[in-house]
Amino acid sequence: MITHTMLRSVRVSIGFALFAQLIGCAAPFNAGNMVPDHVTLVHRLSGDVSVTVTGNRESSTVGASEISNDAFAQAIGNALDRFGLFTKVEPTGAVARYKLIAFVGQTDQQLEGPAQTVKMKVSYQLVDAPTGNTLWAQNVQSRYTATEGGYLAVVKRLRLANEGAARDNIQQMLHGISTLEICNSPEIVAPAAGECSLR
């Protein structure tokens, strides 16, 4: 005999499955939306850099889309290029003076309610390629809450929340690297205030 409780459980399961399918079919993330509008830089580094990103899944445990490693790497590269933190941004895997490695260790997505919140934790490491020395390393945590639209706009809000969390994370990373006093190295000179150059 099918009870009211069983029917309600089936409806909930079907509803969740449809919801997971809906958010899994969201529009792809836009790397341009993950680039900060403003970053306060302390120093700029002369020398090229390549970016490598690992750790991200294509979808979360509930089926919601997550920012891919390639999209996040593109966003980081675009941000580095926009603000000129390094002389040049090389393609991923290319030989460069510096290697910026990002490991996305955590992406928490809140899917219920009229607002979607995404929390993101990324471990960054800036490596001097010729020596293999780590020049800077930091765990950066960020979060963003999207409230645009009503309940039917959940897909859009989830995308905006992911992009917002990534944007804030990248902004913190750019500022952190720019605080490096790498000019104190005997191999590096500072020809102008706020700018470092290799000899």
Image (tube, rainbow, N blue to C red):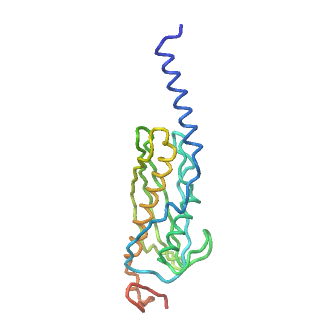
**Residue placed at 37% from the left, 88% from the top?**
193
Residue 56 sits above or below residue 100 on the image:
above
Q: Position of residue 1 (x, y in %)?
A: 53, 7
Q: Quadrant of residue 23?
A: top right
**Residue placed at 45% from the left, 72% from the top?**
134
Q: Quadrant of residue 63?
A: top right
Between 67 and 18, the residue placed more toward the observer is 18
Residue 198 sits above or below residue 114 on the image:
below
**Count of numbered labels shown in the rendering:** 0
Q: Position of residue 14 (x, y in %)?
A: 55, 27
- Given the current orientation, which residue lies at the most extreme front position? 149
**Residue placed at 37% from the left, 80% from the top?**
181
Q: Position of residue 3 (x, y in %)?
A: 49, 11
**Residue placed at 40% from the left, 80% from the top?**
43
Specify whether 175 is left or right of 127: left
Residue 117 sits above or below residue 167 on the image:
above
Between 66 and 48, the residue placed more toward the observer is 66
Q: Position of residue 176 (x, y in %)?
A: 39, 70
Residue 193 sits above or below residue 20 on the image:
below
Q: Quadrant of residue 25?
A: top right
